[in-house]
Amino acid sequence: MSATLMFFGAFLAATVEMVEALTIVLAVGVTRGWRAAFIGVAAGVCALAIVVGALGPSLVTYVPLDALRVVIGTLLLIFGLQWLRKAVLRSSGLKAMHDEAAIYEREVAALRDDYIAPGFDWTGFTVSFKGVFLEGLEVAFIVLTFGTNDGRFDIPILGAVAGLVLVVATGVLVHAPLSRVPENTIKWVVGIMLSAFGTFWVGEGAGIDWALSDGMILVLAACFLVLGLLLVRSLRPRPEAVPTTAGEVTL
Amino acid sequence: MKVAGFLRDFGMFWWDFIVGDSLTLAIGVLVSVGLAFALVHTAPSGVVEVVLPLVVAATLAASLIRR
């Protein structure tokens, strides 16, 4: 598989998920203090590193490649279609765009109401840890699936770390939730990529000899893009029927 | 009781992680995988290459219609 595609897949997935994690960490830091927030982040990142480090090499060594392709293809397909589904619903106006500013305000309000006990703030730590770990787990799975299929983890890890660094650096500079990140556009791209890779790998694992070899991934991606756009068009609510005079309706 | 609570939370986490907002999507993906295995050795050459992406596409469409 192309190293560039693998890098950007992990990079974009990490960017989206880390924007969500940053929103939670900022809310914890502002309301409960930065110490618990930062320790929660460090613990979350360590837990993620352990998941990737422990599972990655053992998967490659002990599980047959075709079985691995089917399992990781299925996971990628589920994640990819979930992302694409959300992107289609948002683009068609049936679901609100992901508004990080609103989520931030909600988190801050919830955390402010909570009592802060003297000593270490376990609530702040737990919220921060869960935010980083749970949002990062999806990225960890994507890194694992890309890495296991290709037999090397450096490129997807590099992509995910680049996404993480970009989001953290921007968060430090802006010091506010990153509400301007075009999250839905990224969801489109990642959703299409993961769905295409997932379909391809499930097929390979099942024994399909794809006509265009790896080139089929691009064909599948193009098909998912067209399908997504058609679905947006068909799902977009039509303008309300406006009554003009009694019994007459314009559309 | 604590163990039961932990197991329930653990199960809910994985359910949420895999199924997410759409059960249709998760079931459709599993059906696609099963179909790929069923057809790859039985159907004429090239059929499964077309059927698999079509079933995946139908899964996405169905999950949006049944939202």
Image (cartoon, coloured by chain):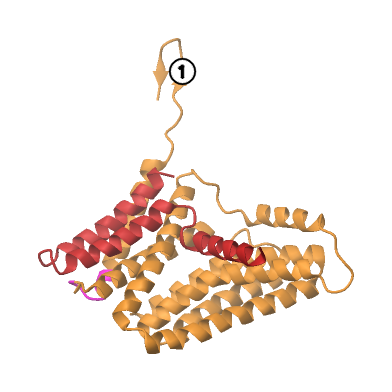
At a point 58% along the width and 67% down the height, the residue shown is: A135
The C terminus of chain B lies in quadrant:
top left
Chain the render paints orange: A
Residue A79 in picture, x, y percent from top left: 44, 64
Instruction: Tell whether position A214 is magenta.
Output: yes
Rendered hue of chain B is red
Say which of B30 and A92 sits in front. B30
* Percent x, y of residue A1: 33, 80
Instruction: Give the magenta-colored segment's residue range.
Output: A211-217
Q: Can residue A153 be seen in this view?
A: no
- Amino acid at dot 1: Pro
Q: Residue at x 33, y 76 (%)?
A: A69
Residue furthest left as drawn: B44
Can the viewer see residue A170 in this picture? Answer: yes
Q: Please report the residue visible at 55 percent of the width from the left and 60 percent of the height from the top.
A: B12
- Residue underneath mark 1: A243
Drawn side of residue A158 relative to residue A118, left or right: left
On screen, A10 above or below A57?
above
A50, above or below A237, in the image:
below
Q: Which of B19 and A13 is in front in this view?
A: B19
